[in-house]
Image (cartoon, helix red, strand yellow):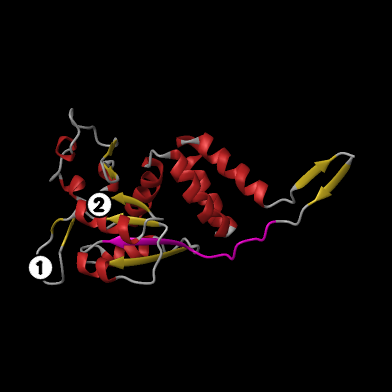
Amino acid sequence: MLREKLPKEKEPQQRPFRILILEDQFVEEAREAFSSLKWVEVKVVSTLKELKELEEYEPDLVILDRNVPEEEGKEPQDLLEKAAGLVKSKFPQALVIGYSSLFHHGAIQGAEIGAEKGAEIGEIIEGNIMPVLIIPKELGDKSKRDSWLGAFKIGLRSISNVELLEKKLFEVLRSLPDEGKKFILDIYAEANPELKEALERRLKYTGESKETISTE
């Protein structure tokens, strides 16, 4: 019996976790919210036109506000589905969530999102395009850094297509520094331990030498 070690798979070059945010009112708050996470890169656009014109950027996660202007100088309107469709065509590799402060201000109730029986605050509603976050009231205040971080975590947990999520997250995690890997894996420690274990197994497997066994 011969045991032969095959060459170790080449490690991907490290890069940041890229977050693209469509937000017109809390632009600086959105940028600053992730400043303590050195492995995260944030880009904020304020209008649908800016989103359309964005080139040479490949986000891993897109966070969309519900009400934004079509272009600078115009009044905000509900462009969530239009923005989501645009993101899906421009950045098919990205995970996408919707995040609105209107829940915090009481302007939108769960029943208005499209659920047949309404929804309690904190539940997740799955739409045809993407998950829309119905967040706890304390996370609806976008002027607070913790609200953005909380929505970020809830958003990653809310995506129900586990197979797609595992595939996309694995490719991203491979390129992140250890601090980033741990942060994202910890999000799933309680919410989806099976996904966390699957990702850890794949990361461990690609980091080790593979072996083949042949007999003579």
The label shown at residue 142 is none
Q: In the rendered image, which quarter is residue 57 located in?
A: bottom left
Which residue does the image show at 74% across and 51% down from the upper left? 209
The answer to whether residue 166 is left or right of residue 4 is: left
Depth check, front residue: 102 or 54: 54
Q: Amino acid at mark 2?
A: Asp
Q: Position of residue 214 (x, y in %)?
A: 83, 41
Local SS, label 2: loop
The label shown at residue 74 is 1
Q: Position of residue 79 (x, y in %)?
A: 17, 55
Q: Which residue position holds label 2? A: 141
Q: Which residues are magenta?
A: 9-22
Is 14 above or below relative to 164? below
Which residue does the image show at 57% across and 60% down from the upper left? 177
Local SS, label 1: loop
Q: Quadrant of the C terminus?
A: top right
